[in-house]
Image: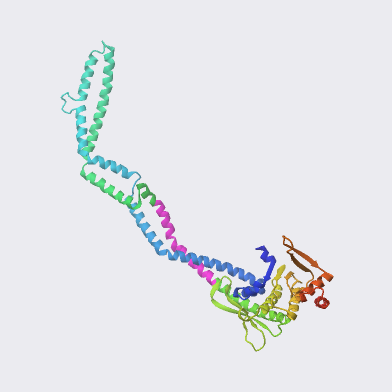
């Protein structure tokens, strides 16, 4: 990311890229300057926020029906559970109680017989309490004589107390059993059915049913907040949309103003690049659709000579014309948006003669503000460099080596002659090379 700010690399592929609408728009935006960059940054920030909020709003709105149904179902479920008011463990307690009530008569008979066996109301002496008391009285008569019998009598006394206590419990329980009837069993079975219905719906256990009251209430609160969130998002989306529209309009106005200046500046540069009759037009068209860069389509149009109609460079410009247009753009834009280093890799492809000389001169002019590295096979371009390097690849032997040599004096003249004619030792070529170097120095 830092490298993109430090080095601008242009190759033959950039000539192809210059045919694209996005590259042409980016060139204009770079030329438009710092104020435009600031407005574009603010616009892009607002645009992303608008799109994100709009996407969230669309998602919530699309799911609103489903979320509304979920909220209604939760509301009914919570209302049903609250009306029943189940208690933890209640289903198990009711199951045990129902089991007991189902056998009420058997329980009553068993309890009554047990009580009768311990303490008969008729008092005929055949019950356990009477027999224990009788045995105790007999032993107490002889307790003074035999200490062992005294101890046993005391044990029977304790046993009598316990039998009286158990008899009381049996009597109380028998009274409770006699108070329970079929009506109580019906109430319990109805309550069990009510709880089982809740368990089938919201279970699998009664604890799960009770837990739904808490989790369901939280979820219902979230779903009921959709209306507020939708209203909040709708307000934000509307405000951001208005902001984006105003920003796009401001970008359009700035682009149109910059387009007029860029057209004039590039046309002047093209005149110096052996295209004296050519004229470049920068056309800015406002569209209805908003995008991250605004609402404009930027198109570079070239009129190669008077009387011809301006045509898009993507369709009409040759490779040589594209090279010169790209160089002219870079020279002009460098005045507004200069980077420390430019690399041009054979951007002079398809150009020769006087046009090549002018390209070299323009590259030298660009080098006044930035470092310019040029890969070229044209002597007319190389003549304008203040540092001439030759890259040589040696394929002798099994190892391929590349080396870089600095050329000065006679070595440079010989290399220039080789570029011109392929004959580094030719006197005519050497004379032409010296002439080119002197021409470049004088300019």
Q: Horizontal and vertical percent for residue 417? A: 79, 74
Q: Is residue 437 above or below residue 147?
A: below
- Quarter of the figure that contains the N terminus: bottom right
> Any magenta on residue 223?
yes
Q: Residue farthest to the front?
A: 397
For the point 25% across and 23% down, the residue is 160
Q: Along the line of sight, which residue is nearer the eye, 413 or 242?
A: 413
For the point 33% across and 48% down, the residue is 86
352 horizontally vs 99: left or right: right
For the point 54% across and 66% down, the residue is 49
Q: Which residues are magenta?
A: 213-242
Is residue 383 visible to us here? no
> Any magenta on residue 354?
no
Q: Along the line of sight, which residue is nearer the eye, 178 or 403?
A: 403
**Magenta region, main secondary structure:** helix
For the point 38% across and 52% down, the residue is 213
Q: Horizontal and vertical percent for residue 416? A: 79, 73
Q: Horizontal and vertical percent for residue 332? A: 70, 76
Query: Splitting the image into 4 quarters, where does residue 120 fall?
Result: top left
Q: Residue farthest to the bottom?
A: 307
Is residue 156 visible to us here? yes
Q: Along the line of sight, which residue is nearer the eye, 441 or 41?
A: 441
Q: Horizontal and vertical percent for residue 13? A: 64, 72
């Amino acid at each position: 990311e830092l490298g993109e700010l430090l080095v601008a690399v242009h190759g033959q592929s950039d000539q192809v890229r210059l045919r694209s609408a996005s590259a042409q728009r980016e060139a204009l935006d770079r030329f438009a300057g710092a104020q435009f960059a600031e407005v574009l940054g603010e616009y892009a920030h607002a645009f992303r926020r608008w799109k994100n909020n709009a996407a969230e709003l669309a998602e919530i709105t699309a799911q609103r029906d489903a979320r509304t149904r979920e909220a209604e179902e939760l509301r009914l479920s919570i209302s049903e559970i609250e009306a029943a008011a189940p208690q933890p463990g209640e289903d198990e307690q009711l199951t045990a109680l129902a089991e007991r009530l189902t056998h009420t008569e058997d329980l009553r008979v068993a309890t009554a017989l047990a009580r009768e066996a311990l303490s008969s109301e008729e008092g005929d002496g055949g019950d356990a309490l009477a027999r224990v008391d009788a045995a105790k009285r007999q032993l107490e008569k002889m307790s003074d004589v035999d200490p062992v019998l005294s101890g046993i009598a005391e044990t029977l006394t304790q046993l009598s107390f316990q039998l009286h206590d158990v008899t009381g419990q049996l009597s109380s329980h028998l009274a409770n059993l006699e108070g329970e009837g079929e009506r109580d069993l019906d109430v319990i079975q109805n309550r069990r059915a009510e709880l089982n219905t809740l368990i089938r719906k919201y279970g699998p256990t009664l604890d799960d049913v009770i837990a739904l009251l808490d989790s369901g209430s939280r979820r219902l609160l979230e779903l009921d907040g959709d209306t507020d969130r939708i209203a909040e998002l709708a307000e934000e989306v509307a405000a951001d949309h208005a902001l984006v529209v105003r920003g796009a309009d401001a970008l359009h106005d700035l682009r149109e103003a910059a387009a007029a200046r860029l057209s004039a500046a590039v046309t002047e540069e093209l005149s110096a690049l052996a295209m004296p009759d050519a004229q470049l037009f920068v056309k800015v068209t406002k569209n209805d659709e908003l995008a991250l860069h605004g609402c404009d389509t930027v198109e570079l149009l070239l009129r190669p000579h008077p009387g011809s109609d301006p045509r898009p460079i993507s369709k009409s410009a040759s490779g040589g014309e594209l090279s010169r247009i790209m160089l002219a753009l870079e020279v002009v834009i460098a005045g507004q948006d200069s980077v420390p280093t430019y690399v041009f890799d054979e951007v002079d492809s398809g150009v020769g003669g006087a046009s090549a000389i002018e390209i070299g001169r323009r590259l030298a002019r660009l080098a006044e503000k930035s470092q310019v590295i040029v890969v070229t096979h044209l002597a007319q371009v190389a003549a304008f460099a203040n540092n001439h390097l030759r890259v040589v690849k040696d394929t002798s032997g099994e190892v391929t080596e590349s080396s870089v040599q600095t050329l000065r004096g006679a070595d440079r003249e010989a290399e220039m002659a080789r570029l011109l004619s392929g004959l580094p030792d030719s006197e005519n070529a050497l004379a032409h090379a010296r002439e080119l170097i002197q021409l470049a120095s004088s300019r």
